[in-house]
Amino acid sequence: MRRTKQHNLLVLALALTLAACSDDGGSPADQGLADLGRPDNGPQADQKTADGPAADAATGTKTIGAAGGVVASADGHLVLTVPAGALTQDRVFTITPATYTPTFLTEVPSTVDSTAGTVSAQTTHTSTWCLYDKATGFIACCYTVDPDTQFSIAVALTALYTDCAAMSSVPLSVIVLGYEQPGS
């Protein structure tokens, strides 16, 4: 297991290095993963980042405003990338592992990056987000993004599926992100 995790981190580091070398700066999800504020990859909790105040790597909390920014769960498994203009005022976002597994999710069109080991989706709201096997309905590795927020333009969510043991045998062609509808 430790060797697999080290391999996944090496692959992720290589993908991020290659994305950083591209002419276009990489996708927003790539940029988010490169600036997680994770203890093993990115600024420490007391440092500033290029997109604003430092992320608190220990809690997965960050203030994001009109200029946009990136916040990740403390374990780095879910990243929210907010582009400039998606918010009109500062909001303190926290991403934490969900304390339950929803029984029903709304599937969101997603993109799997097998090199980076991620699945990404666009959304205009926060919720509880999970990896979802669209073939069987299997739900795993859920995270809650607080506070409840409606964005004026789409934001990106990127999940690291390679560290989700429950998804290890699921074919990549059926892994998507899904969210829990409020009140369900």
Image (spheres, helix red, strand yellow):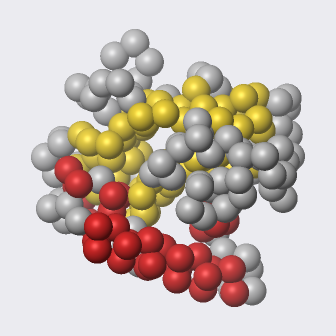
Q: Percent from the top left, x then y, of residue 147?
A: 62, 23
Q: Is residue 84 visible?
A: no
Say if 173 sits above or below 127 in the image: below
Looking at the image, which residue is at 48% across and 48% down? 75
| Left or right placement of residue 64 versus residue 106 in this view | right
- Tell me what residue is drawn at x 53 percent, y 44 percent: 74
152 over 20 or under it: above or below: above
Name which residue lies at 73% across and 76% down: 25
Judged left or right of residue 90, residue 142 is left
Looking at the image, which is closer to me, 85 or 79?
Answer: 79
The answer to which quarter of the image holds residue 31 is: bottom right
Does residue 16 appear in the picture of this structure?
yes
On-image quarter of the C terminus: top left
Percent across and percent down for residue 46 are 78, 46
Q: Where residue 18 appears, x then y in whole percent?
A: 60, 85
Residue 24 lies left or right of residue 116; in this view the side is right
Residue at the top extreme, as displayed: 183
Q: Decide which of 75, 110 is in the foreground and name it.
A: 75
- Quadrant of residue 126 in the image? top right
Report the number of numbered marks.
0
Residue at 14% across / 62% down in the picture? 169
Q: Is residue 51 above or below residue 20?
A: above
Up-down: is 89 above or below 49? above
Is residue 24 shown left or right of residue 36? right
Rendered location of residue 144, percent (x, y): 47, 31
**Quadrant of the drawing holding the N terminus:** bottom left
